Image (tube, grey):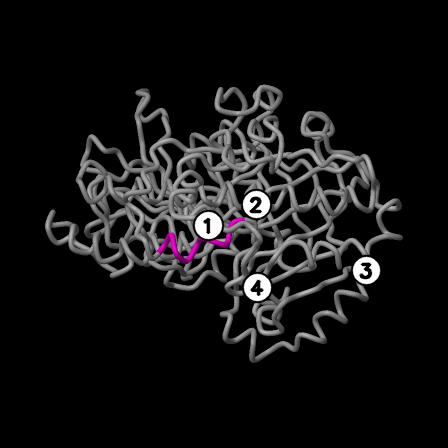
Amino acid sequence: MELKKLKRVSEYEWEIPPVGDMKVPGKIFASQKLVEEMDEKVYEQVCNVASLPGIVRASIAMPDAHWGYGFPIGGVAAFDPEEGGIISVGGVGYDISCGVRTLLTPLEKNEVIPHLETLVKMLFETVPSGVGSEGTIKLSPSQLDEVLVEGAKWAVKKGYGIPEDLEYIEEKGCMPGADPSFVSMEAKKRQHRQIGTLGSGNHYLEIQYVSEIYNQEVAEVFGLFKNQVVVTFHCGSRALGHQIATDYLPVLAKAARKYGIPIKEKELVCAPINSPEGESYFKAMVCGINCALANRQVITHLVREVFQEIFPGIFLKVLYDVSHNTCKVEHHLINGKLKKLYVHRKGATRAWGPGRKELPKDYQKVGQPVIIGGSMGTASYILVGTEEGEEKAFGSACHGAGRTMSRNQAIKTFRADQIIENLRKKGIIVMAKSKKGLCEEAPEAYKDVNEVIEATCKAGLTKKVAKLIPIGCIKG
């Protein structure tokens, strides 16, 4: 991206002054190096989002931002329904509520290493992964409707976890406002055996250990300690979320024409939040969020079963579960007034600071855990949200390293067997369903997660708590 187009606000904050149809400025939180590495499409998409009706404060891009459909991946924007604010499929994404969950074990690295090969193999055999992967849970349309309304609460009710788990999931495991009647039968049919599955693409399950503690006080509140083994996995709403997005793109395209909303990119189609079309998409999208929360809850149960077989008597506690691709109703201070906003985060993580009553009671004094995955074989991080981040970016942060290479290019560049060998030399055991999928997610296809984390923290959006290093990984 050309720096001459931007106004530098600080070392890690850049502004795109409003031009043309832009209703608010664009904001990019990143180092100069990361900004220069961003493609021009990010600049264009940030400007396009800033031109949408009812947008509040700024169109925002995170340090891991790269080109996406409509919104940049790593894009954040909030809309005021009282000011004609819109809701957009492109602002949520196809994999609705794609997110991460970290589970804490009481084990240290040296206790797990002797069993690592067996542990990875059993997880690979127990947690279904790969394109079109299906689990053992088979749901009728009416049973799936329960999942779409109740989310992780449904899973706990069915024995896949304990009530305490729900306290450590966004929305307490169930986002209100879902209405399965707005989800197509095609979406439901595609999902009927995908609860409890990882899927493919950049989805993964990693066994990691805590290599560094940066903030001892917050780490103790979160239950983290040096050399502790944790499990982090990344997945979403699978086929159902993708089909909801596919179904509503033409609906919102028609609505945009109906309400006279100028659209600069076809994937940016949208409808007023308070319109029948906007309300329909929101109700369906919430179903997608609840589907993802139930999916990650069932996977949690499967992971616990594997660990308990190898390490009898231990229990894995949920640190937190955060989503990346959502539109959520939140209240934020705008010009001194508390406003109800619809906050789109597309490839971005909610990162609330201390004091939010929506957080678990034991986290309210320090802030929300923010789980950031790196590329395959590299570090991941546990961060914590800040009050400054709420003021600057509606309490939002990056969600990962961010791609620098297309999947097609990665497939042409890397060999699966070489990736597996290189990672094994680093002490990381990897098992994957697909060689193609492994090549797509080669570590070199991503930005340096350490740079992204540095920018996110230096911009004031989060603070560092702990660094996680992988020792085992399963991929789709």
Of the numbered discs 2 and 4, the one sitting upstream in the chain is 2
Label 4 or label 3, whichever lies nearer to me, is 4
Q: Is residue 398 magenta?
A: no
The residue under label 4 is 130
Left or right, residue 426 beside residue 171 = right
- Mark 3: amino acid: Gly
Indicate whether 6 appears above or below 315.
below
Are the residues at dot 4 and dot 3 in contact (C-beta closer than 8 Å)? no
State the image coordinates of residue 69 (x, y, percent, origin top left): 35, 59
State the image coordinates of residue 297 (x, y, percent, origin top left): 57, 40
Of the numbered discs 1 and 3, the one sitting upstream in the chain is 1
Is 364 or 429 nearer to us in this picture?
429
Q: Secondary structure at mark 3?
A: loop
- Mark 4: amino acid: Gly
The residue under label 2 is 100
Q: In which quadrant is the C terminus drawn?
A: bottom right
Of the numbered discs 2 and 3, the one sitting upstream in the chain is 2
Q: CA distance from mark 2 to mark 3?
A: 23 Å
- Mark 2: amino acid: Val
- Give the residues in magenta: 187-195
Q: CA distance from mark 1 to mark 4?
A: 14 Å
Left or right, residue 2 beside residue 33 = left
The residue under label 1 is 237
Q: CA distance from mark 2 to mark 1?
A: 12 Å
Are the residues at dot 2 and dot 4 in contact (C-beta closer than 8 Å)? no
Are the residues at dot 1 and dot 4 in contact (C-beta closer than 8 Å)? no
Q: Which mark is residue 427?
A: 3
Q: Secondary structure at mark 4?
A: loop
Q: Secondary structure at mark 2?
A: strand
Is 450 or 75 nearer to us in this picture?
75
State the image coordinates of residue 243 (x, y, percent, origin top left): 36, 57
